[in-house]
Structures are given as structure tokens and as C-alpha cells.
Amino acid sequence: MKMTQQGSSEGRYAYVHGGNKVYEWSQDLDSVSIFLRPPPPVPGNLIYVEIRAGEVTAGLKGADTGPFIKEETGGLVDVGESTWVMDGEGEGREIEIVLNPGFDFRNAEFNGQVPDARNFMGGVGYS
């Protein structure tokens, strides 16, 4: 069974399958980040990440075991504005894949009305 649960830090969610954490992800208005832990002895030059408009794949170059992840993105991604990096050392190493949604407004209709900030998307909260 596939499940999403709270990740290792604030704002991250873990994707768990068969009791194992496959990856973590976070999202903000500008991007979606996917966080993976590569096998400890593997150097970065043996990792591949393919970012396509509707899919992201990551794994070991030349491995016949298949990718770490191969997931649909749930929406179109601006491939040219998306990237990945591997950072850290030892057990703390992590691959971060940053997907830019590349908002597409081609079919948007503008009516000239400005939304009321008190109500729009939950409104403005003051404390």
C-alpha cells in the first residue's frame, strides 16, 4: 500500500511503500522538491536523473535493478527550469530534485475583476 506521511522535517512528506520510505517531498508556490537517499558508497557521477514534462526518473547508471523512482509529476513541469543536486556526506547524503511547474496561462480567461483579499484563497489572516 502506498502512503504519504509526515517526513523528516517541517514541510516534508514521506512517500512510503511496503513499509519503506522511498522518498520525501515538499512543495511551495514556485516548485516541488523530491528528496532521495542514494546508496552510501555510490558517487554522484553514477546517479542519473531524468526530468520530463510529465515524469521524473532517478536511479543508478547501468544498473539492471531499475530506477529508485519513476513517477508521474501530476502536472506539467518546465524541464529547462528544473534541476537536481546531490549534497552531504555518508548517511546524510541526499539527492534533491527541484521541479518547476512552469505555470501555463495560455487558456486563462481574464475578466478584469480583482479578487477580494479578505476571501480569496482563504483570505488574509492577522494575529
Image (cartoon, rainbow, N blue to C red):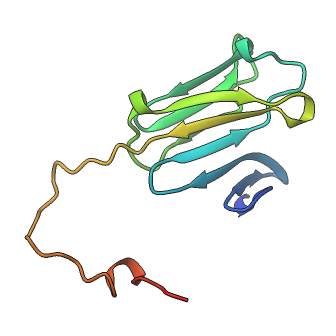
Quadrant of the frame with the C terminus = bottom right
Front-most of 20 and 123? 123
- Count numbered badges in the picture: 0
Quadrant of the frame with the N terminus = bottom right
Front-most of 108 and 127? 127
What is the x, y in percent for residue 89?
A: 87, 28
The quarter holding residue 8 reads bottom right
Front-most of 101 and 21? 101
92 left or right, relative to 85: right
The residue positioned 83% from the left and 18% from the top of the image is 42
21 left or right, relative to 95: right
Which residue of the protein is positioned furthest toward the front in this rendering? 127
Is 24 above or below relative to 46?
below
Which residue of the protein is positioned furthest toward the left in this rendering? 112
Is 119 above or below relative to 93?
below
What is the x, y in percent for residue 105?
A: 21, 51
What is the x, y in percent for residue 18?
A: 81, 52
11 left or right, relative to 52: right
The residue positioned 12% from the left and 75% from the top of the image is 113
The residue positioned 49% from the left and 44% from the top of the image is 73
The residue positioned 49% from the left and 87% from the top of the image is 126
The quarter holding residue 87 reads top right
What is the x, y in percent for residue 34?
A: 63, 43
39 left or right, relative to 32: right
Is 35 above or below relative to 114?
above
